[in-house]
Amino acid sequence: MDGPARAPEAVGGAGEEEAIVEEARYRLAEAVAAELRASAPLGERLRTSKDDPEFLVAFHANSRLHWIGAWRERFETLFSGRPPPPPMTSPRPGCARVVLHVDMDCFFAAVAAAGRPALARVPLAVSWSSGRESGGEISSANYLARAQGVRAGMWCKEARTLCPRLVVVPYEFDRFVTAGAGLNRAPF
């Protein structure tokens, strides 16, 4: 014999198992995304004022840019009954002031994944895109998607070229308001 005996190689190996787990994770995430799209307010609506006289009302109620633009007004109303924050003081000697940076570009995607384990470990983006072949604009992408080149403002078709396993979910403005209110309350 030319050395110690070796156990035979396992058929398939760990790489194959990882691929099977990854495929199952992706399929589950896609199923969750499909459910979210099916219940989305713009999912089945006609998207012109000619065909739907309520189009503009529905559009503004479901537009991310309108939602972002109304953010300040919404939170001024939400926090109007609260006392003003205490005045800023100088840091104590030997202490530094802390500045908190919140990555709002990832905010929608983080909220979409919150409480949904199926969306936690997949490349995820938020858009009104209706599926694999749709060309909607991406509003938000998580860090797994960003690592593959996906960015806000990118068209879904381009993003899926860079990231074929990208899972796209619709906007959920009620959840964004709840999460945003929690963020605003946390430091005070």
Image (cartoon, rainbow, N blue to C red):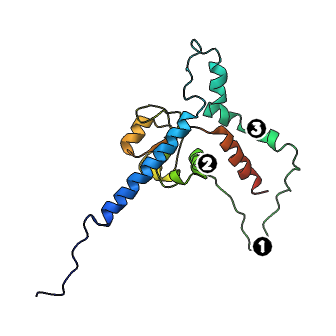
Question: Mark 1 sits on what residue?
Answer: 93
Query: What is the x, y in percent for residue 58?
Result: 64, 24
In the image, residue 66 above or below residue 53 = below
Q: Quadrant of the N terminus?
A: bottom left
In terms of sequence position, does the residue under pointer 2 or pointer 3 come before the other?
Answer: 3
- Disc 1 marks a residue whose amino acid type is Pro
Foreground tag (1 vs 3): 3
N-terminal-most mark, 1 or 2: 1
Residue 182, x across and y down, in percent: 73, 51
* Measured Cα–Cα span from mark 1 to mark 3: 38 Å
Residue farthest to the left, as pictured: 1
Q: Say if residue 151 shows up in the picture.
A: no
Instruction: Choose the circle earlier in sequence order: 1 or 3.
Output: 3
Residue at 56 percent across and 17 percent down: it is 48
Amino acid type shown at disc 3: Arg
Secondary structure of the residue carrying tag 3 is helix
Q: Residues within 10 Å of mark 2 (few under 14, many from 20)?
A: many
CA distance for labels 1 and 2 = 38 Å
Badge 3 density bin: few <14, some 14–19, many ≥20, Cα 10 Å: some
Tag nearer the camera, 1 or 2 = 2
Query: Rounded to the nearest whole Å, what is the CA distance between mark 2 and mark 3?
Result: 18 Å
Residue at image point 76% right, 38% down:
74
- Checking the image for residue 111, the label placed there is 2
